[in-house]
Amino acid sequence: MSISEQLTDILQSVVHPPGDFYAAGVQVTPLPALEVEGVGPLSFPLPPEQARRLIEVAERAPYGRGPDTLVDPAVRRAWQIAPDRLRFGAGPWSETLSAIVDRVSARMGVAGGVSAELYKLMIYDPGSFFVPHRDTEKAPGMFGTLVVVLPSPHEGGALEVRHAGRQVTLDLPGAPPWQVSYAAFFADCLHALNPITEGVRLALIYKLVRGGGGPTPTPPDHREATARVAQVLDHWLGLLDREGPAELLPEKLVCVLEHRYTPAEHAFAGLKGADAATASVLRAAATAAGFRLDLALMSIEERGSARPADGGPRHNSLLPGWRNESDRAFEVLGITDRSLTLTDWRDPEDAVVGLGPMPVEAHELCPQGALDDAPPDEKAYQEANGNEGATFERAWRRAALVLWPAYRFLDLISVAGPQTALPYLEALMARGAEGATGPEVLGLAERVLLFWPEQPVPGPAWRARTLRALVRLGDARLLEQMITQVLAPRKLQREDFDAVTDALRAGVGGARVRVLLASLLPPS
């Protein structure tokens, strides 16, 4: 059984129950018309004067210990205002809240009739915190807690949530003023609030309740599946170390997700149901086994010859992304070109990963043959014209989780070509976390040059862009390698000459590099 088939079998077991034990994100929204008894209508972002007045009319937040309700600033330091002292005016807040509830319910795998019941308004001033604790079920059908942070400038206050051996740390920003941040988690998850260090956080707390009877939803526990996936990953690493890349041994795996996502939902935090469960298992197993996990958009594109289907309907409407052609029912006669490509990368913290487009091999798909029976998301048909027969184009677009051995990551993106690796190199340099000559930066630059001859030769734009990146690094050895192995053997064009001229003006790399650069320029 292949690595892809082994993982597919295991991941199918995490569908029931689906989801993850938490959800978090931000929602762009008109802000609520919220009035507090004794303070009046609130302004956003929350002004310091209103924050002070809210604390004056609030009471110390208690905590529960068994049947008792206690107030102890050594356990919980915060302020609260009861819901009967809050008034929401006319506006779209109910629609915003409904959208948030739908999103967190999908992420947590809870289906059917979920509502949010306002519990209290919380005010956290500097020094506010809450030690690790679990929430009690405060209403029939309550299964979780939703925290919505309103625009209120502050620092600190990360929320830590733990369940089944996993822990996540969720930042809940109070800016910008046109959005709210939110976090939701199952009630029996252990969670803690780190101290607020500056400013004041204002948060609405809701009880998540599922109606319709039935058992109260509980957080999924995928520890067994995670351990099994980690074993498969360990086995995979062993095969790569012993055999190296082989025809049926993937160097990365692309796990195609079940749901469709809008660009705004293209994030780990936006994954739903079974997809969230799959990401949760793979993320934990990858960490344990020394693998890297990313989220990307996978595109499968096909072109070929076709003929109109008998009696097929014909439409004049245009589909996004295609030329001005008729969309008509057609039969495929042959496929002349097929490509699988990954773009739009995100890491598990939902930061943009500066990777360019990366090709995918068919045997790297998980499950094998993913989308073979799915209707295309886009298609176009071009009728026969003169001596040319009828042709078609069609494409599938899906989110996918990309799993690869961490120690081979730089090699794999470099082998894919500078169009894949160079944006990542530039992102590393811009981030500057290691300094301009950190080992990851220099190692990737070396690999880009090493693997350049193994790929279809990129055009002058990529050569020029690579040279400019190496000039910023200022490493004489890499610059000389770029000149002698990439530039000198090729017929250079205007973009190459412009980059060479800029490199000479920068004066990096020493006398030998400057001589080599000058030798590339045409005689004046």
Image (cartoon, rainbow, N blue to C red):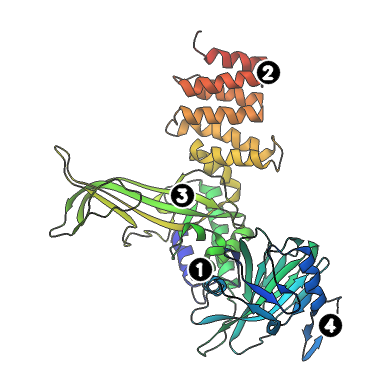
User: Residue placed at 59% from the left, 21% from the top?
Assistant: 502
- Give the number of marks: 4
User: Residue placed at 57% from the left, 13% from the top?
Assistant: 518
| Sequence-wise first label, 4 or 3 | 4
Residue 454 screen position, x and y as percent: 46, 33
- Say if residue 10 shows up in the picture: no
For label 2, the residue is 510
Say which mark, if any, is on residue 71. 4
Whole-number angstrom distance, CA of label 4 to CA of label 3: 53 Å
Q: Is residue 459 above or below residue 279?
A: above
Q: Is residue 82 above or below residue 259?
A: below
Labels 1, 4: front one: 4
Name the quadrant of the N terminus. bottom left
CA neighbours of label 1 inside 10 A, class few (<14), some (14 to 19), many (20+): many
Amino acid type, callout 1: Lys
Residue 251 screen position, x and y as percent: 50, 49
| Sequence-wise first label, 1 or 2 | 1
User: Residue placed at 68% from the left, 38% from the top?
Assistant: 439
Whole-number angstrom distance, CA of label 3 to CA of label 2: 39 Å
Identify the secondary structure beneath mark 4.
Answer: loop
Q: Is residue 261 above or below residue 522?
A: below
Amino acid type, callout 4: Val
| Sequence-wise first label, 1 or 3 | 1
| Sequence-wise first label, 3 or 2 | 3
